[in-house]
């Protein structure tokens, strides 16, 4: 059976240029060819990174030295983000399959949309990698050396310090890439909604497929924020990270809403057009009623009354129809996920003041 993440062709579509797959997609293709689930290999990579930390940490030690919980969260950044991008690509392909009844395009265009939805362009992704490296160097350099040594749990610069410095660069590259992956994928979702969607206010079920994808993307990205907040709450005491984490949460909120704005506007326009049509018919019915009353021609009033009631029922049904294509549970789940780190931070502050007093 053909994988949803590897469409047959990538024919050009207006506004969507052709491009080669990125290093992320090549890596995911490689893990797909290996036996077993891709998550197994990402988990193995995480264990390998922890093993390197343990070896470097225990050089010359008489007793086994274990890292604090933050190190486990820190070292999972690259394996988790690469797995998450792979997972979201598969979910995007499946979402497009479920969305197929709502698409107005031929098979070649469908394959092209699938390719763009599940594949990052090579050159921009490489540029993001370079930006991630440069940004990581700026962030690391902004943190005093004493705090850097404290995070690594060493007293002086050495092999373990350099290893964690390298992994910090890798973590920032992974974060930059998942942000770019999210922007690219959800921009394509918005493009599909605006250009290839059959809009029907009362047939929104296929449209929910992509709202689930955007919700999964937002929650998936937030897990890293959760881990860092729980494992190292002192990060909030560093200026650059205390600013970055709230911005990260705002990005996650936009991740859920942004791709749905285009179809929301189309559904809203469809709703307004339907309301105008029904209002026009209601006005005709009211004018007919007034004409009969003025002419004292009370004939067939029962049918006219039923018609007016039916138009009112239709008007209220249209008015109640939602224009955001998501299940009610989806925004609640994302909102809860967004509020969790904030509540955790507030609880930490309250406990610090209580214990301090």
Image (tube, rainbow, N blue to C red):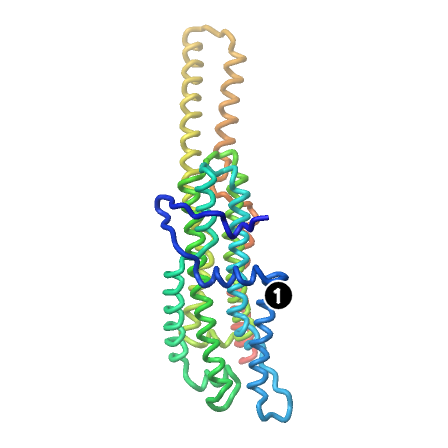
Name the residue: 53% across, 62% down.
Answer: 30
Could you tell me if residue 338 is visible in this image? no
At mark 1, the secondary structure is: helix
Q: Nearer the viewer, residue 325 or 180?
A: 180
- Quick check: can you spot residue 144? yes
Q: Name the residue under label 1.
A: 40
In percent of the image, x 35 and y 44: which residue is there? 14
Across and down, in percent, residue 62 comes to 63, 93
Instruction: Classify residue 39 as left or right of residue 135.
Output: right
Give the camera-side residue of 48 and 95.
48
The correct choice, above or below, for 245 with respect to 144 in the image is above
- Image location (x, y in percent) of residue 251: 43, 59
Vertical placement of 144 versus 330: above or below?
below
Q: Nearer the viewer, residue 250 or 49?
A: 49
Relative to the observer, which residue lies in front, 237 or 168? 168
Q: In which quarter of the image is residue 22?
A: bottom left
Estimate the x, y position of residue 133 in percent, counting from the top left. Answer: 39, 72
How many numbered discs? 1
Q: For label 1, count other residues whose C-alpha is less than 10 Å away and answer few (under 14), some (14-19) or many (20+).
A: few
Q: Where does residue 12 sit, x and y in percent of width and height?
A: 38, 46
Image point (49%, 39%), residue name: 322
Figure quadrant of the C terminus: bottom right
Residue 130 higher or lower than 121, as above or below: below
């Amino acid at each position: 059976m053909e994988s949803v993440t590897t469409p047959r062709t990538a024919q050009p579509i207006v506004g969507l240029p052709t491009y080669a797959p990125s290093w992320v997609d090549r890596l995911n293709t490689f893990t797909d060819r290996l036996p077993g689930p891709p998550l197994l290999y990402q988990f193995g990579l995480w264990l390998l990174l922890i093993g390197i930390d343990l070896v470097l940490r225990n050089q010359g030690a008489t007793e086994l030295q274990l890292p604090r919980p933050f190190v486990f969260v820190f070292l999972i950044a690259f394996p988790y983000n690469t797995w998450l991008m792979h997972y979201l690509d598969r979910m995007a392909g499946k979402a497009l399959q479920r969305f197929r009844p709502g698409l107005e395009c031929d098979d070649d265009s469908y394959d092209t949309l699938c390719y763009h939805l599940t594949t990052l362009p090579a050159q921009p992704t490489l540029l993001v990698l370079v930006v991630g490296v440069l940004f990581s160097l700026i962030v690391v350099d902004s943190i005093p050396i004493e705090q850097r040594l404290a995070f690594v749990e060493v007293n002086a610069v050495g092999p373990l310090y350099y290893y964690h410095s390298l992994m910090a660069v890798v973590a920032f590259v992974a974060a930059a890439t998942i942000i770019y992956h999210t922007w690219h994928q959800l921009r394509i979702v918005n493009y599909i909604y605006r250009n290839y969607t059959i809009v029907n206010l009362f047939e929104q079920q296929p449209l929910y497929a992509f709202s689930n994808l955007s919700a999964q993307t937002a929650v998936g990205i937030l897990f890293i924020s959760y881990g860092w907040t729980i494992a190292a709450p002192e990060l909030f005491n560093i200026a650059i990270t205390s600013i970055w984490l709230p911005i990260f949460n705002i990005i996650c909120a936009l991740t859920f809403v942004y791709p749905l704005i285009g179809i929301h506007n189309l559904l809203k326009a469809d709703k307004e057009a339907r309301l105008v049509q029904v209002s026009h018919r209601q006005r005709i019915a009211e004018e007919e009623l007034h004409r009969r009353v003025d002419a004292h021609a009370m004939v067939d009033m029962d049918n006219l009354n039923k018609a007016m009631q039916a138009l009112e029922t239709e008007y209220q049904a249209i008015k109640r129809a939602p224009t955001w294509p998501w299940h009610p549970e989806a925004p609640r789940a994302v909102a809860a996920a967004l509020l969790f780190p904030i509540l955790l931070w507030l609880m930490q502050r309250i406990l610090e003041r209580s214990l301090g007093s």
